[in-house]
Amino acid sequence: MSNFTRADGRAADQLRSISFQPDIAPHATGSVLVSFGDTRVICGATIEAKVPGWMRAQNVSGGWITAEYSMLPYSTHDRKARDISRGKADGRSIEIQRLIGRSLRAIVDLEKLGPNTLWIDCDVLQADGGTRTASITGAYVAARLAVQKLLDSGRLKENPLKDSIAAVSVGIVKGTALLDLPYIEDRDAEVDANIVMTGAGQFVEVQGSGEEATFSPAQFSELLGLAQSGLKQLAAAQNAFLTQHLLAKS
Amino acid sequence: MSNFTRADGRAADQLRSISFQPDIAPHATGSVLVSFGDTRVICGATIEAKVPGWMRAQNVSGGWITAEYSMLPYSTHDRKARDISRGKADGRSIEIQRLIGRSLRAIVDLEKLGPNTLWIDCDVLQADGGTRTASITGAYVAARLAVQKLLDSGRLKENPLKDSIAAVSVGIVKGTALLDLPYIEDRDAEVDANIVMTGAGQFVEVQGSGEEATFSPAQFSELLGLAQSGLKQLAAAQNAFLTQHLLAKS
Amino acid sequence: MSNFTRADGRAADQLRSISFQPDIAPHATGSVLVSFGDTRVICGATIEAKVPGWMRAQNVSGGWITAEYSMLPYSTHDRKARDISRGKADGRSIEIQRLIGRSLRAIVDLEKLGPNTLWIDCDVLQADGGTRTASITGAYVAARLAVQKLLDSGRLKENPLKDSIAAVSVGIVKGTALLDLPYIEDRDAEVDANIVMTGAGQFVEVQGSGEEATFSPAQFSELLGLAQSGLKQLAAAQNAFLTQHLLAKS
Amino acid sequence: MSNFTRADGRAADQLRSISFQPDIAPHATGSVLVSFGDTRVICGATIEAKVPGWMRAQNVSGGWITAEYSMLPYSTHDRKARDISRGKADGRSIEIQRLIGRSLRAIVDLEKLGPNTLWIDCDVLQADGGTRTASITGAYVAARLAVQKLLDSGRLKENPLKDSIAAVSVGIVKGTALLDLPYIEDRDAEVDANIVMTGAGQFVEVQGSGEEATFSPAQFSELLGLAQSGLKQLAAAQNAFLTQHLLAKS
Amino acid sequence: MSNFTRADGRAADQLRSISFQPDIAPHATGSVLVSFGDTRVICGATIEAKVPGWMRAQNVSGGWITAEYSMLPYSTHDRKARDISRGKADGRSIEIQRLIGRSLRAIVDLEKLGPNTLWIDCDVLQADGGTRTASITGAYVAARLAVQKLLDSGRLKENPLKDSIAAVSVGIVKGTALLDLPYIEDRDAEVDANIVMTGAGQFVEVQGSGEEATFSPAQFSELLGLAQSGLKQLAAAQNAFLTQHLLAKS
Amino acid sequence: MSNFTRADGRAADQLRSISFQPDIAPHATGSVLVSFGDTRVICGATIEAKVPGWMRAQNVSGGWITAEYSMLPYSTHDRKARDISRGKADGRSIEIQRLIGRSLRAIVDLEKLGPNTLWIDCDVLQADGGTRTASITGAYVAARLAVQKLLDSGRLKENPLKDSIAAVSVGIVKGTALLDLPYIEDRDAEVDANIVMTGAGQFVEVQGSGEEATFSPAQFSELLGLAQSGLKQLAAAQNAFLTQHLLAKS
């Protein structure tokens, strides 16, 4: 790694400060305010006792997970108009919420969820790069809190979560591979990748993209390694938070 | 007043616990998380350096204030679908955001705002009755914080706020007039009123309504009196918070 | 009251000329063209033998009343674009139709309506201030005519209407409280209020609002008194029309 | 013609009773309530001092005519949901309003209209077959009244109307060719045609259609003849009404 | 007929070169790429084992035919924005797809179709005038191919097609009546008509229209004659293609 | 690689039959019908002499590339409803068209495009897996043909394309890594990846995803290798086709 200096003084392979504030939205089944530095996302997990129409129509057993992602209007320096004011959903938001949903479904045993939908809502309160990766990382925590409440109340018999998941961004800025990019770096990145990985180290999603640039297989390999190291730390942080929080409640 | 007992033990003329958490959304010009008991609303005030199309078309000088109100999906016990998923704005939300906008405009000197729009966004994080009155009360605080930042930075020359405003709900439940109703009382109320008043005690909006009932002029008069007493306390709470917070910053 | 002169020469506490032209839309169950001076609204009441989806889903017995309000494109001096051309409903219209629906429901015994929806449609043919109050006043008359037809045909067993309702606007113009404002006064009013009252003198809705001004409790009290006196006259006019018209038919 | 008996006793080649009630919507530039028997349509013609965006973009000189057609919810025996409630315009309405617009444009010298749009609004108050033909026939009358007002006020220098137009329906019911079909005949017609013709006897639109049937060239020829005779009477009725009404005003 | 010279050298009463390329969309039940000169349209006929909601609600037996028409964005010289990007369906497209559906239904025995919907999709690949008439002509061929596949597989017991249909445009350009107009002639036509006729010579739809002109009964009669002669040739071309193609398959 | 047998008999690392049919839509600037086995996509590239609003607003120089992707209703065995009929764009389509646009922009020098938008339209005529990778591969060919026409006509001075791009899908089915999956394999794949690469072997997009499964870094590495080998063949096929076709034209 080169001796590149980051605006916030971090090492190239260092995460931003990560934190979880539980029960931010007490009416959700589980909720958390996740922070990756100045990026903060409200993650709510809410159970609903029905499944989507297509599952009923096709007689599919088990449950479903649907995610919705939105940036609150005041999350950005220039106010972002609401989807409903613009009259249609934002293409980027649709892409992100599909990613969040797929990621969660990869670690959930949908049969054990029973005939329920687990709604995952991620609303960005403050945006400073990496909102989709913070969302996925927080969504898992909110889902785990929701599952615990459903197990405690007897509404679920078994934990449907097979593993944990977290996500992180990596990118190449001026030729240097960096972990967990804030907006100022993300804006200037030649390559941008988002990696979703389980606690056990299996990939769930790998997405690398060069908007106005391309990247070599070797560069991509370096980015993947950087992401894997960050994702191990995120899994540990999730685990530490959940262990302490769920113990405190029991 | 009868010896009616409220679920939360309050006196009939007693407000819920009120609090303001500033800077909940740091990218807004001003923001606050306002709580009326278990009702919590994120209020953001964001300045934008242009005015609506109809003002430009009609060559109206000065600025404008537009409000948007939304309930986050996890703010209610049963998840509330987003407007964009339902494909159209919610009639109740439209009514509320028009009320918030009118209320703020009544205490603002739009000329002093210059050619700017002040966007007021109220997103309900937790709903337990009185979300519109908490929104207006918090919106004023967010607007005051935004104005201070704009005065400090020199973007505004004079404070365009002529007074403060706050709002409170009153209602009649089983024949008893009550102040600041939580959901459980609001659901059973025969009459429901929302009053918006300035710090100086002038009315801005008076709205009383009986969905499946009617009310006598005497009852309405009692409700107005109850609201006025509550609104004085709210104005004092806003003032105390702002004095302390703005002092701490200066 | 001051010696203020109104454009149309009326006394401050005088209504405009009120009239009802029945059966304007013969395919409705009941209909009337109501006039408050130059404000004219087509009010249709149409019965439909089903209830809204949410009532069926929640197994609520009885019927429902839904109101829709619209300004015809040629009702204003500058043509008003249709909602469908603008692609979305007008916020003001939504607010008004919710008000009309709530007002009607307050005087109807929904159980006696049976498993039916009574649709109230108010389409403004000519707008000169007070379109919402003329709409409510005419909607009651259309509903009463519809109920009579349903009683006569045996489709309803009992009259579900518990009382009559009417509505009127009051406002303060250049410091003077005025009853039933035409557009030219409404445009300049510092305070604008709309009051809905039953024939028996009970309030159904009280809405007072100062767009760029505030008002004192004493002013509001004066406005309420003025409205009450106008509403008694409107109730008498409704009653006289209906008595004569229903007699003529029987 | 066979000795077929019509429900309302008319001869096969006889029009329903035709009438025009002027100034039904006084805020329009010109307006009329046209009746073809129990089919009644409010026709408003409103001038707007601008042309559509595509004319400005392509720098086309002269003016434009745009028509909108809608059935009021209470115009039919079963209430018809508004377009805005259904979320999209009705295919049939779009087809009809395009027809009305094209028909009017065929007799107007758009250059003489100046840089203005003449909006033609047709709202069906009561539907009993032939709403599109009554709309066109009334739209011409409303347009003529609007033109007169614009000539009188000096806003137009020359009359842009080159001729009159009227429209009528013809159809084949149980093998018999009939003129001006009410709903009960229209519903059972094997063939349905709508013809638009100028006062001078030139065709503007000829539309014949068999929904679940076909028709021979000879049958079509008979229908055209029937329509031509009815259209001459309609042109005479328009002319008589306008002559008397415009004289009375001058 | 005058000695008018057409841009492509055809006689006034001559069709453009007509061709049918079968199975252009193999996943449709039947499909064809139809060409009228440089106008090319993909016509797909797809069977779906259910009927529209209104048929189920009204308990109507038999099947239904629904048509959809769209111009692909690259079918015109200036790219045509998609409906979904514009946010609403195009008025002209709605008119055309209603015409295609009505035309097909006129020759189909809906009872014999069973409880199925036959979807007719016409997507214009290249537009050079006459896209609606090419669509109808191709739609019949696609429907015939679909019916054959359904008969062969035993899903249909009897052929529900009672006759063939084809459509052609005719128009008057500089006073001369012309058959099958390409864009360059259509653009300049004073009168434009589209005629739909069965193989047996019965009319299904006759639509003649003068956008900024009118036409005499004699001119219309000449146009109808021209269309009839072209439609006989089109019916023969359909028949020749289908005979050869269905033979080749059997 | 295991001795897994594919339904179509291909080796695990073998592409389907690839072909390009040029000028499928002659009104586009460039167009091609690309086939990957039974997956066939119409790709049109159309130049428009303006740039998006946000570029003008921000005064960005150069041009832009926007892609739209759609599945024609008859492209699938069960008819797929059009977006405009469903009232909103399909989430999956939005994701794909964003991918196509980003991919093309990575190899284009937007400055050399001048103040133009190059519209890329991909409409799936027949869907059998890999529609997004066929779309990107065909979109490049259509863009190259469009660029040649613009260079030949002098509308472009220099070729803005810096390299070629192609895309291919890879996936793991029953533990075996496979190249270029048809629908039947795609449906059963545990892991699905889409890779976009330039002719020079640089990555543009790497997207790997396990809907209800996860995958190891080693598996992902194997998939990447398989994709790279397939992408070299695709680049060669594009080059061979373009060389021959452009030579033939010159």
Image (cartoon, coloured by chain):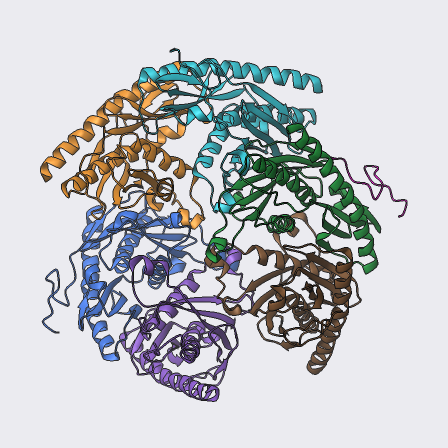
Chain colours: A blue, B orange, C cyan, D green, E brown, F purple
- Point out the stretch of residues depicted in magenta: D1-18
Q: Is residue F32 left or right of residue E180?
A: left
- Seen from the viewer's position, the closer of residues F73 and F139 is F139
Q: Position of residue F205 (x, y in %)?
A: 32, 73
Considering the image in quadrants, where does the C terminus of chain B appear? top left
Image quadrant where residue B98 sits:
top left
Residue B190 visible within the image: no
Q: Please give the name of the residue rendered at 83% of the width and 53% of the height, measured from the top-left corner.
A: D222
For this view, does E227 lie left or right of residue B43?
Answer: right
Relative to C205, residue D75 above or below = below
The front one of F116 and B159 is F116
Is residue C219 one of those drawn in magenta? no
Please provide percent x and percent y for residue B101: 33, 35
Residue drawn at (58%, 39%) of the image: D45
Q: Position of residue D127 (x, y in %)?
A: 68, 39
Asked if one can make out residue F138 in the rendered structure from this viewpoint, the answer is: yes
Confirm whether the magenta stretch covers residue D6.
yes
